[in-house]
Each structure stands twice: as C-alpha cells, then as structure tokens.
Image (cartoon, helix red, strand yellow):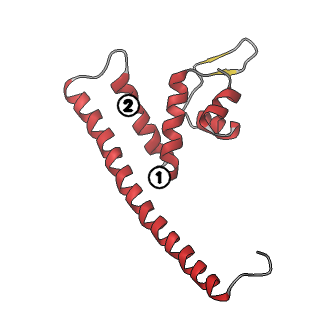
Amino acid sequence: MQIGEVASRTELSLRTIRHYEDTGLVIPSARSQGGFRLYTEADVARLMVIRRMKPLGFTLDQMRDLLDATGRLDAADPAEGAERQELVSRVREYEQAAVLKIDELRVQLARAEDFVSTLRTRLDQDGPTSGS
C-alpha cells in the first residue's frame, strides 16, 4: 500500500511516517516503478508499535531497540537459546517500563480530573453565566 493509505490506517501524518523512515525506524518494503513508497502489513504493524510507544515517552532509540528485538524474535530463522532469552528479557523490560509509564499517566489524569472538578464546583457557586 502507498503512504497515504498507511497514514490513514495508522493515524500518522505523511510527514511523521517520512521522519520515521529518515531515522530508520520503518523503511518501506518496496518502491513502485514511479518511485512511490510501498508498505506491507508488517510495516504498518511497526508503525503502530511506534505510535503506541510515543505517548508513553519512549525515545526513538528505545523504539528502534524494541523493534529490533521483536523483529529478531519473529524472524523466519528466529534466535534460539541464550540469544532468545536476552531478546525476551529486553521485550519484558519494555513491557514493565510501559506499565510504569501508564501508572504515571493515570496519576496525572486523576489530578487533571480533580482540577476540572474543582473548577466546576467553583463555577456552580456562581450560577449560570450569560453564555449558557
């Protein structure tokens, strides 16, 4: 599929997808005869991983590291033995880091909701405004 369809499916901008290509995170699987980028379902899956990591504050290097580890685990000739255990351990570390980041976001969300509640309580004390 072409970049426009990928952008629509991933809800990422064309510019963002091109940036991820420039940084080596996602390379189009092919180019059309006209030079258009062509992506596969695997490319879309990589972009979705990146899209999910970004709001959690993971760096591009961390994204690259996780994608490398999962790519090696999913390869046609997958890693075995100690190498496989090391890759699984790396993925597990990212899972644990994501859980911690989600917990932090839940705290921030609770604080934001408390703030909105405080503002609504204050506004309710003043009664309806002329704009209502």
Callout 2: few (<14), some (14-19), or many (20+) C-alpha neighbours within 10 Å?
some
Looking at the rendered structure, the kind of residue marked 1 is Leu
Please give the name of the residue rendered at 68% of the width and 40% of the height, measured from the top-left corner: 13
- Residue 25 in view: no
Does 55 sit left or right of 99 as displayed?
A: right
Which of the 4 image quarters holds residue 76?
top left
Residue identifier under label 2 = 70
Looking at the rendered structure, the kind of residue marked 2 is Thr
Please give the name of the residue rendered at 46% of the width and 38% of the height, measured from the top-left corner: 64
Which of the 4 image quarters holds residue 2?
top right
Element type at mark 1 = helix
Closer-to-camera residue (45/125): 125
Task: Judge whether 43 appears above or below 114 on screen.
Answer: above
Task: Judge whether 54 appears above or below 111 on screen.
Answer: above
Mark 2 and mark 1 lie on one chain; the one further toward the N terminus is: 1
Closer-to-camera residue (52/85): 52
